């Protein structure tokens, strides 16, 4: 039908353009964030592209949801602004009749969002965590880049190497500042150093240097010079980091229904329901006001998305803390938004208003009084 095909084609064009713009904005923001993490030593600079790719994939459900919401609002507002909506309504179409072509266009996108939030989202987070964990567990000297100060894995040492060899086992002009467990501080400098393995432990052997030891109470300072000095770097034991909640598969969350898992599961289910509610909300609330232009609908779209999305994130923490049960939270938030959207759509579909209802009641009462007189 012409009615269905024309709406779906315009929705497709609007959704494609919106998706490209949002993807570019999010990609730029995540690139800046990833570069900041690399500069602080949280991720491997050589793996920036991988970390960025996994992060973008994990954010795709949110991007698709917002792009779909904006595309529907922009399409319907354009139809109101160009009086196309009046033509369709005069031809016998109702506002509720727009739900069929809109949902026929949106259901593949809603399916993709659901699949991604249940399966791709935890997989992407798991891959990102693995990259960060592998980078965090590397040896202390592997952290050091020539000409840069780098912190050790324990956070108690700071290394600086002016120059190193191609294999990274020797360096020149070495500086090490460390804080011991008793609070004392040590500053060691040497002209050169090399890496040696003694058994299963890794040592940095320094040559021709000086060592300054400061007591914890700053009461004494010990200065010593050495021709060769060895200090242990790294550790033979590799700490295992617990699996992040966002990286756990959805099936594992279902099998272990504790509060934290239920909160994460509620977020994933809620993300899929949020996308569906946004489709219904866009049809129910979009209006045409030539004086307001496109800015009014855009402002409402962004405000509704931010407000709903923040409630979704807050709901996760409420369920995890035991403030709300999962079923009560899902019914209250998503069921409430669904009911509000349906009532709003029925109001506009039947052209109902409180003023009109009061006027009808007043006219009915006046008519009854006149008949009795």
Image (cartoon, rainbow, N blue to C red):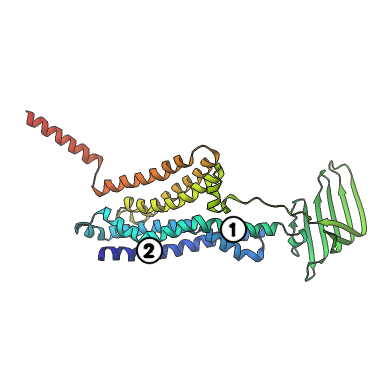
Any part of residue 302 in sight: no
Q: Quadrant of residue 343?
A: top left
Horizontally, residue 7 falls left or right of residue 184, namely left
Any part of residue 370 in sight: yes
Question: Which residue position holds label 1?
Answer: 33
Residue 105, image x, y percentages: 35, 61
Mark 2 element type: helix
Q: Which of pointers 2 and 1 lies earlier in the amino acid sequence?
A: 2
Q: Quadrant of residue 368?
A: top left
Real-space Cα distance between discs 2 and 1?
29 Å
Residue plotted at (36% across, 58% down) = 72
Residue plotted at (51% across, 37% down) = 323
Residue 99, image x, y percentages: 31, 55
Q: Of the numbered discs in the image, which one, if any, rests on residue 14? A: 2
Looking at this view, name the residue that lies furthest to the bottom: 166
Q: Of the numbered discs in the image, which one, if any, rests on residue 22? A: none
């Amino acid at each position: 039908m012409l009615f269905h095909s024309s709406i779906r084609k315009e929705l497709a064009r609007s959704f494609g353009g919106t998706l490209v713009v949002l993807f570019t904005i999010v990609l730029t923001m995540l690139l800046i964030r990833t570069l900041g993490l690399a500069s602080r030593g949280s991720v491997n600079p050589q793996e920036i592209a991988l970390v960025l790719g996994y992060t973008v994939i994990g954010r795709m459900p949110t991007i698709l949801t917002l792009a779909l919401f904006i595309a529907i609002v922009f399409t319907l507002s354009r139809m109101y602004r160009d009086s196309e909506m009046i033509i369709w309504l005069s031809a016998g179409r109702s506002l509720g009749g727009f739900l069929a072509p809109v949902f026929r266009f949106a259901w593949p996108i809603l399916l993709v969002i659901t699949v991604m939030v249940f399966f791709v989202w935890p997989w992407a987070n798991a891959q990102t965590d693995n990259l960060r964990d592998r980078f965090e567990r590397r040896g202390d000297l592997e952290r050091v880049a020539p000409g840069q100060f780098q912190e050790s894995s324990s956070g108690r040492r700071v290394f600086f190497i002016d120059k190193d060899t191609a294999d990274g086992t020797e360096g020149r002009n070495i500086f090490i500042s460390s804080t011991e467990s008793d609070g004392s501080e040590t500053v060691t400098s040497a002209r050169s150093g090399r890496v040696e393995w003694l058994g299963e432990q890794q040592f940095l052997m320094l040559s021709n240097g000086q060592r300054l030891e400061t007591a914890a109470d700053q009461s004494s300072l010990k200065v010593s010079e050495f021709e060769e000095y060895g200090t242990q770097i790294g550790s033979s034991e590799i700490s295992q980091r617990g699996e992040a909640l966002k990286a756990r598969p959805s099936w594992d969350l279902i099998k272990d229904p504790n509060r934290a898992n239920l909160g994460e599961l509620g977020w994933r289910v809620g993300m899929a329901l949020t996308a569906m509610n946004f489709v219904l909300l866009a049809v129910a609330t979009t209006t045409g006001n030539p004086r307001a232009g496109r800015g009014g609908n855009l402002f409402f779209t962004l405000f509704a998305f931010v407000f709903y999305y923040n409630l979704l994130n807050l709901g996760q923490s409420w369920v995890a803390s035991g403030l709300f049960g999962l079923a009560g939270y899902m019914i209250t938030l998503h069921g409430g938004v669904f009911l509000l959207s349906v009532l709003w759509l029925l109001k506009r579909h039947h052209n109902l208003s409180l003023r009109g209802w009061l006027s009808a009641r007043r006219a009915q009462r006046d008519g009854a009084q006149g008949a009795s007189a």
